[in-house]
Amino acid sequence: MEQLALPLLGRLDAPAAVPASMVSWASTYREAVRLAWRLRRVHYATQRQLAAEAGLYAPHVSDYLSTDDKPSRRSLPAEHIPAFEAFVGNTLISQWIAGKAKLTVLEEMQATKAAA
């Protein structure tokens, strides 16, 4: 009888940065949210699990991730971005926002240091 090798469960680190080329695929905030979801670390995770883990209202999550972009659709509120990114395991939304503000990580760090 052949034995199957099972990988050991490891610790999941903080959300990882996404390559800039992938961030540029999103032209709107809602597209960035959907792309972050598609690139989630745990591919079998459900929207219901996202809602429970990130403290989101479950019926609103389907609006955040809906592809039709109707004006009646809700967008992921800014205050929930960190929890959303922690769940999906990437920082694509934050990177997209920083890119739209035309800030690099170095510029953000320099601004923070200057303000202190």
Image (spheres, rainbow, N blue to C red):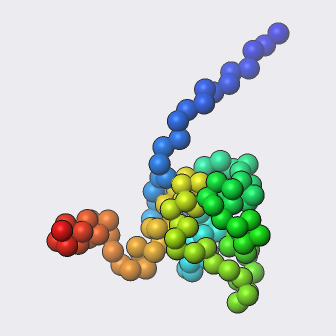
Residue at the extreme top: 1
Pinpoint residue 65: horizontal percent, then vertical percent: 70, 70
Q: Is residue 38 visible?
A: no
User: In which quarter of the view is residue 50 placed?
Assistant: bottom right
**Which quadrant, please, contains the C terminus?**
bottom left
Q: Residue at x 71, y 54 (%)?
A: 49
Pinpoint residue 17: horizontal percent, then vertical percent: 45, 57
Is 44 placed left or right of 94 in the picture? right
Pinpoint residue 102: horizontal percent, then vertical percent: 36, 78
Q: Residue at x 53, y 41 (%)?
A: 12
Is 88 placed left or right of 60 in the picture? left
Count of numbered marks:
0
Viewer-side residue, 84 vs 89: 84
Q: Is residue 11 visible?
A: yes
User: In which quarter of the view is residue 83 placed?
Assistant: bottom right
In the rendered image, the vertical position of residue 110 relative to residue 6, given as above or below = below
Q: Residue at x 70, y 67 (%)?
A: 57
**Which quadrant, please, contains the N terminus?**
top right
Residue at the extreme right: 1
Is 114 placed left or right of 13 in the picture? left
Q: Residue at x 57, y 80 (%)?
A: 28
Pinpoint residue 105: horizontal percent, then vertical percent: 32, 65
Is 40 placed left or right of 44 in the picture? left
Viewer-side residue, 37 vs 57: 57
